[in-house]
Image (spheres, grey):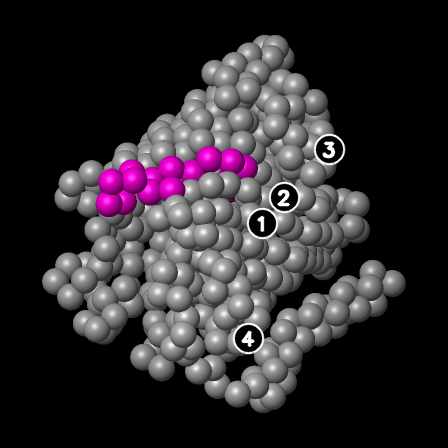
Amino acid sequence: MRRVHSEVRKATLIALLALPGILIHAQNASETKAVPDPAQKPEHSFNELNFIGAEATMPPISDSVVEPGSSFRRALLDHGMALRLVQAVQFAENTLQPPVPADEQAYIGEYPFESAREHLVFSADLHQLHLQHAQFFGTGVWNWVSWNPAGPKTFQVVDLYFYKTFGDDRAEMKAGYISNNLEFLGLLVGGSTALGAQGVYAILPYEVGLSYFPLTAPSFNLRLNGPSHTYLKAAAQRSLDAAGGPATVARNHSGFRFDPKGDKLLLIDEVGYNRSPSTTAHSAWCRAGYMRNTTPYLDLADGKKESGNYHAFVLGDYELNQRDPLHPSLGLYLGGSAMIDASRFNPYNRYYEARLYQIAPFRSRPADLVSAVATFTGHSKYFTDRLVAGGKTVWRSSASLTGSYSLHVGRGHFLTVGMSYIHGPALTPRVDDALVFTASDSVFF
């Protein structure tokens, strides 16, 4: 019976993956090519309406199922506004062993895993209010997962903030409800929310209370751009719940709750060097930082709640070569990460990553990305010792190797497939190694 149920799930996923492409081709066949509007107000630009001022990027608004020159988009642009919808589905399953019962799974893919989300984005450049180099950005999401620990299942606000630059972009400010995982560290391989590679990646910043999609929190972020490609970035963010994502949603269903009892202040500092690629220089980005949370966390050593949880990180990415001098960002990149958390407060306390990725692996595919990522995750001795004392089996660490390919299927349509070999896929119990196949499909309207 479980096999039949699994086959139904797979058939459903295939249909979901194929549907956006069918809709795209059907719409493209019925639409005429967009013609730029010569009367378009020059003070309004789609670039100012996209997701900006962060360490991750979204595809340009022109890379969308809906034509940028459509009457709907032009009408909004004339008023300095844009509206986007992002639909995404994901599937994961271990290929080495048959699925376990749904209520016995310990990691994503041990039983066939599916997720889906609808992500609505609204932005305004605020020229109507006579504000230059400013933006209002708001997003909401419906997020569903087939396995609650990989959640959360939620319907809530994600971002709701005001962005402004000062002094010829020497200073940048964001204030409001912000998902800071896209603002700090630079975790996405390749940097794009659409082409992020698949695999098992660090959750250490989230253990320490960093807000992350789809969980938001009030935050004030400030970035200072210094000379010679240097920058300093800091944030004062209300922490997420110390008990994790499901507890955060349980106490704050809409995401609007400003100050849930017990959630204190998370301070974030990052310093970096970020040189954009050009015809004379390769891309180079190094960043390091520190987070400290004043929220009381359960001390795994003595069972008491105490403040002082922290996270430290160092990451770097360098462009080894350039495929096309006219498009200097297209090339082969090498990167690495090192992170540590306080062992007394967090089950996962060390993370190391090496990554090699190519933007535009083929000349005919300039928007594709292929990657290979190797990781090592260490587990807190305090946490695993307590589990062993309770009669449970554990992995003291975990390692993975992931290969993935991100395909730009068509305008506004992205598909990523990957395989991850994981040694120690769950902290507890001590289950066998896994070879997890993953697929994710995203459509931008």
Q: Quadrant of residue 225?
A: top left
Magenta span? 164-179
- Quick one: label 4, few (<14), some, or many (20+) residues within 10 Å? few
Q: Nearer the viewer, mark 4 or mark 1?
A: 4
* Labels 2 and 4: the sequence-earlier one: 4
Is residue 167 covered in magenta? yes
* Residue type at the position of mark 2: Val
The residue at 54%/32% (across/down) is 218
Under circle 4, the secondary element is helix
Q: Distance from label 2 to label 3 (Cα)? A: 15 Å
Residue 119 numbered mark, or none: none
Question: Marks 2 and 3: CB-CB under 8 Å?
Answer: no
Q: Please give left or right for residue 247 compared with residue 34 in the image.
A: right
Q: Distance from label 3 to label 1 (Cα)? A: 20 Å
Which residue, given by chain and number where applicable, does mark 3 sit on? 250
Question: Marks 2 and 1: CB-CB under 8 Å?
Answer: yes
Which residue, given by chain and number where applicable, does mark 4 sit on? 71
